[in-house]
Image (cartoon, rainbow, N blue to C red):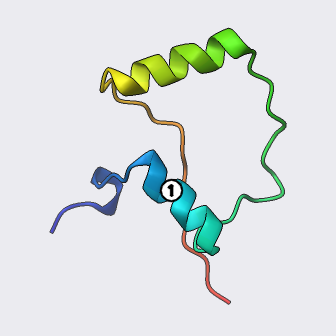
Amino acid sequence: MANELDSSITIKKAIDNIDSGDFLLPAIQRRFVWNTKQIEMLFDSIMQDYPINTFMFWEVSD
């Protein structure tokens, strides 16, 4: 059985999950501090299929 950490989803799927309430951004999320150039460079890396490791997910129960 493959490790769940080895599976990946698209950015669109992550945003869809946020919109549907399946994923929540925790209150511990720090403020957005990147400038425009840094954002452009991140999306350039994504579009070139470079691996990024920027999201951490954990499953919580009621």
Q: Left or right? Give the position of 38 relative to 55.
A: right
Q: Position of residue 21 (x, y in %)?
A: 64, 74
Please give the name of the residue rendered at 71% of the width and 15% of the height, measured from the top-left corner. Answer: 36
Circle 1 crowding by C-alpha within 10 Å: few under 14, some 14–19, many from 20:
some
Task: Specify the amino acid type for callout 1.
Answer: Ala
Quarter of the view holding residue 55: top right
Q: Position of residue 31 (x, y in %)?
A: 84, 36
Q: Where is residue 58 in the image (x, y as percent from the top left)?
A: 55, 64
Please give the name of the residue rendered at 62% of the width and 85% of the height, measured from the top-left corner. Answer: 61
Q: Left or right? Give the position of 36 relative to 28.
A: left
Closer-to-camera residue (6/42) = 42
Please give the name of the residue rendered at 54% of the width and 66% of the height, measured from the top-left corner. Answer: 17
Q: Can residue 6 be seen in this view?
A: yes
Direction left: furthest residue: 1
Closer-to-camera residue (34/40) = 40
| Number of numbered discs on residues | 1
Question: Relative to residue 44, is residue 9 depicted above or below?
Answer: below
Question: Relative to residue 56, is residue 1 depicted above or below?
Answer: below
Quarter containing the C terminus? bottom right
Q: Left or right? Give the position of 38 relative to 26.
A: left
Question: Relative to residue 51, is residue 39 depicted above or below?
Answer: above
Direction top: furthest residue: 37
Q: Is residue 57 visible?
A: no
Quarter containing the N terminus? bottom left
Question: Relative to residue 27, is residue 47 depicted above or below?
Answer: above
Q: Left or right? Give the position of 60 relative to 6.
A: right
Read off the residue under disc 1: 14
Badge 1 element:
helix
Q: Position of residue 49 (x, y in %)?
A: 30, 27
Please give the name of the residue rendered at 60% of the width and 73% of the height, measured from the top-left corner. Answer: 20
